């Protein structure tokens, strides 16, 4: 055991909230992947004010070498940081300046270039001279993790796949950090190093003890080098000098020139804690690996341990006991549905408070990816368009604050926490989280203490109308999976057209929100049952919205593409004027107007052409079932719609509800196709022969009610749902899984930091 540093500073008076901007510029072969180009911050100065509105005291902020001086200091372009760093300072937000973020520098160098440390130090000195008032720096983000990706896993440049390249990349980055701080302190002697890396821990079966112990020693290696703790007595000395190819002199240079962090920055994800198992046959193939000749499973602990690990709090104490230096959690983020993003942040905040109560000097929790992040599910090796929102969602162009932003403001100001979804447990602690037979361990359940922050013990549900309908049952299924308290109401429990019945249901269940997922859905029959259609689709939502106003509840209701007449000739957006052709469309259009006139805070979702894996009567399922059975199937070739995958619709709608969004939103899978084209695309996804498909005119379909020729929906607010091809692929997988009795995997982190 390496003794920790004995001089311990006083603990800061309160835990601070920091923010972080995902700014990775990683290189894959000869292609660079820049997060700031994709999230838009590279061109949006006004984001600075958005960040300050969150109540953060500091922000991890990029002045990246690759962007500022790719061709040398002489030709550096300082205009971008010249605007932004003073703006942060003026608004009371301290910048923690990062110089390299998961990158390998400009094209003329790399992580295994012996000249890399001196070159970065030259750039660091230039930054310090340009901004002598900047106090906090992270010259190289996550050197150990970056070395693993670039030198061992072969994912990023220079794409090494051996221990020697891994160690060379690590030593290069650590030396670069030390020389960079030396150059910075030559300008500003008070400059402080905030050194980040993944705070991981590995567990495993006894048969995996050798590798488990090695990984648990290796996780400290970057910080150990900087602190001058690596000498002949270090547990990994032999590994460094034999398999790693490091010389004794270069290792002892770190001992003789220590540069301990002023703040140990620990990054923690749901994938940070790993389970190694010598029985790979028990696990999914994509969780199995071979390391040092041993084939084994390497899986994130929430997916396999029967009893969850306690989370980050004990790991913070390990860090404190090892180094005795101030600690900040420098990345707190999870790729999950909105309520689990909130629960994850609150759990980490509480864990930091707990560690402080046990004597550890934990200074801050950093909410990571203020503008979200792109394609981390493939380790940013491709631009697939996978996006994880953060406190702001940039998919609409202008960043839209989410419920995470509200939680940040409450934490930073000490206000009571207001979001009722915090009362549930996150997916990483729920019974349905496993990907294999659970493994029993002796680990303790975390002391989350979430519910203690709420005055009421009553868990407020979401009330959902439409118990027997496609949408209502889908909401029930997904709320169950997402651990959102809910109750699906039958007409006997609440008649939405009867104000007294609505009032009684609210008094009985005491919800925080009502989702109107029911109503009259028979478009053709509505032409002869107009009164009934208007009562259920217009009067009912109006009564619900008025009740929600009285009780201060959130309200969400659903509308349709049939509020449009189809003459625009291109997809409709939210602000386009409505002009329904039939009774059904008119009932929905009038409902929209009456609901929003009564309650501008209400959320109205327009959508179109449902398909999904849970009912047998949607167009895609009927088409595939008929065509696969060799039966003919007719579909209109001259009616254009925007198909909508029901699970996507429900998940995104719930996120918007939790975000307290309002007004009209268009939610579809963002493509305009005819019904016939949809059938052919579904056949292609399912591997079904479309030979029996009969493409006919809309007139031949025999509809009673007039329908628009082109009612495709787009959005001027944001395109929040995946592509149609992606949705069809997942639809086919879900149908196949259900046929084999398997449910879909819970949402959660990609293999972000797998060993």
Image (spheres, rainbow, N blue to C red):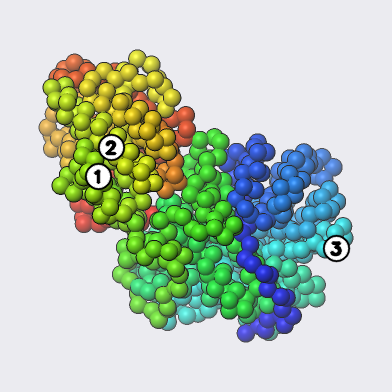
> Which residue corresponds to the image point at 29% horizontal and 40% vertical from the top-left?
544
Q: Would residue 554 be seen by someone viewing this image from the given angle?
A: yes
Horizontal side of residue 132 vs 483, given as left or right: right
Horizontal side of residue 318 vs 542, given as left or right: right
Label 3 to label 2: alpha-carbon separation: 67 Å
Q: Earlier in the sequence, mark 3 or mark 2?
A: 3
Q: Would residue 621 be seen by someone viewing this image from the given angle?
A: no
Percent of width and height locating residue 339: 42, 54
Q: Nearer the viewer, residue 369 or 438?
A: 369
In the rendered image, the quadrant that contains the N terminus is: bottom right
SS at circle 1: helix
**What residue is shown with label 1?**
502
Percent of width and height locating residue 61: 68, 51
Percent of width and height locating residue 658: 42, 48
Residue 732, picture quadrant: top left
Q: Nearer the viewer, residue 197 or 448?
A: 448
Q: Residues within 10 Å of mark 2 (few under 14, many from 20)?
A: many
Q: Earlier in the sequence, mark 2 or mark 1?
A: 1
Count the numbered circles shown.
3
**What residue is shown with label 2?**
543
> Which residue corresponds to the image point at 38% horizontal and 16% vertical from the top-left?
568
**What residue is shown with label 3?**
189
Residue 250, picture quadrant: bottom right
């Amino acid at each position: 055991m390496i003794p920790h540093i004995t001089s311990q500073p006083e603990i800061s008076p309160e835990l601070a909230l920091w923010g972080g901007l995902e700014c990775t510029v990683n290189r894959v072969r000869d292609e660079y992947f820049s997060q700031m180009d994709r999230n838009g911050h590279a061109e949006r100065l006004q984001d600075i004010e958005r960040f300050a509105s969150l109540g953060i005291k500091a922000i991890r902020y990029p002045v990246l070498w690759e962007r500022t001086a790719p061709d040398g200091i002489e030709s550096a372009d300082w205009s971008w940081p010249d605007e932004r760093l003073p703006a942060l300072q003026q608004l009371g937000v301290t910048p923690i300046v990062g110089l390299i973020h998961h990158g390998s520098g400009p094209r003329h160098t790399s992580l295994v270039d012996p000249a890399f440390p001196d070159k970065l130090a030259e750039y660091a000195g230039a930054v310090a001279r340009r901004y002598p008032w900047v106090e906090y720096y992270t010259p190289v983000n996550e050197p150990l993790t970056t070395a693993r990706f670039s030198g061992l896993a072969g994912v990023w440049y220079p794409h090494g796949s051996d221990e020697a390249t891994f160690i060379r990349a690590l030593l290069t980055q650590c030396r670069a950090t030390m020389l960079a701080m030396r150059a910075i302190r030559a300008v500003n002697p008070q400059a402080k190093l905030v050194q980040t890396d993944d705070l991981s821990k590995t567990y495993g079966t006894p048969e995996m003890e050798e590798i488990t112990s090695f990984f648990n020693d290796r996780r400290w290696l970057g910080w150990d080098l900087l602190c001058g703790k690596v000498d002949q007595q270090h547990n990994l000395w032999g590994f460094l000098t034999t398999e790693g190819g490091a010389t004794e002199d270069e290792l002892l240079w770190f001992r003789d020139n220590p540069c301990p962090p002023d703040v140990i920055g620990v990054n923690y994800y749901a994938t940070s804690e790993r389970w190694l198992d010598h029985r790979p046959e028990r696990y999914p193939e994509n969780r199995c690996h071979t390391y040092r000749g041993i084939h084994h499973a390497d899986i994130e602990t929430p997916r396999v341990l029967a009893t969850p690990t306690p989370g980050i709090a004990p790991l913070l104490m390990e860090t404190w006991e090892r180094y005795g230096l101030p600690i900040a959690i420098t990345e707190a983020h999870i790729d999950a549905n909105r309520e689990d993003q909130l629960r994850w942040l609150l759990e980490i905040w509480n864990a930091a408070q707990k560690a402080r109560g046990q004597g550890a000097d934990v200074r801050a929790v950093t909410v990571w990816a203020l503008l979200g992040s792109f394609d981390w599910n493939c380790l940013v090796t491709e631009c697939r368009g996978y996006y994880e929102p953060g406190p702001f969602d940039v998919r609409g162009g202008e960043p839209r604050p989410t419920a995470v932003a509200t939680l940040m403001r409450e934490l930073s100001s000490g206000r009571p926490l207001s979001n009722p979804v915090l009362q549930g447990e996150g997916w990483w602690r729920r019974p349905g989280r496993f990907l294999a037979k659970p493994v029993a361990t002796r680990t303790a359940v975390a002391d989350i203490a979430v519910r203690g922050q709420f005055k009421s013990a009553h868990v407020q549900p979401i009330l959902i109308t439409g118990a027997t309908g496609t949408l209502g049952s889908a909401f029930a299924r997904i709320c169950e999976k997402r651990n959102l308290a809910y109750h699906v109401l039958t007409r006997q429990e609440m008649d939405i057209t009867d104000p007294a019945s609505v009032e009684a249901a609210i008094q009985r269940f005491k919800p925080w929100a009502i989702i109107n997922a029911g109503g009259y859905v028979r478009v053709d029959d509505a032409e002869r049952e107009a009164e009934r259609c208007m009562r259920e689709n217009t009067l009912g939502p109006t009564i619900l919205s008025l009740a929600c106003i009285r009780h201060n509840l959130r309200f969400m209701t659903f509308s349709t593409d049939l509020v449009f007449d189809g003459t625009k000739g291109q997809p409709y957006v939210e602000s386009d004027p409505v002009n329904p052709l039939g009774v059904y469309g008119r009932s929905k259009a009038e409902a929209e107007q009456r609901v929003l006139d009564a309650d501008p805070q209400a959320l109205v979702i327009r959508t179109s052409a449902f398909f999904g894996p849970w009912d047998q009567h949607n167009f895609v399922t009927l088409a595939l079932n008929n065509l696969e059975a060799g039966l003919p199937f007719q579909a209109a070739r001259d009616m254009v719609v925007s198909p909508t995958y029901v699970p996507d619709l429900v998940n995104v709608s719930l996120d918007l509800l939790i975000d307290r969004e309002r007004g009209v939103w268009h939610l579809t899978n963002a493509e305009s196709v005819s019904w016939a084209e949809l059938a052919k695309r579904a056949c292609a996804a399912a591997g079904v022969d479309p030979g029996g498909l009969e493409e006919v005119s809309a007139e031949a379909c025999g509809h009673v009610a007039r329908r628009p020729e082109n009612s495709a929906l787009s959005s001027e607010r944001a395109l929040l749902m995946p592509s149609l091809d992606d949705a069809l692929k997942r639809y086919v997988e879900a149908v196949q899984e259900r046929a084999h009795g398997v449910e879909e995997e819970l949402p959660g982190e990609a293999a972000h930091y797998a060993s």
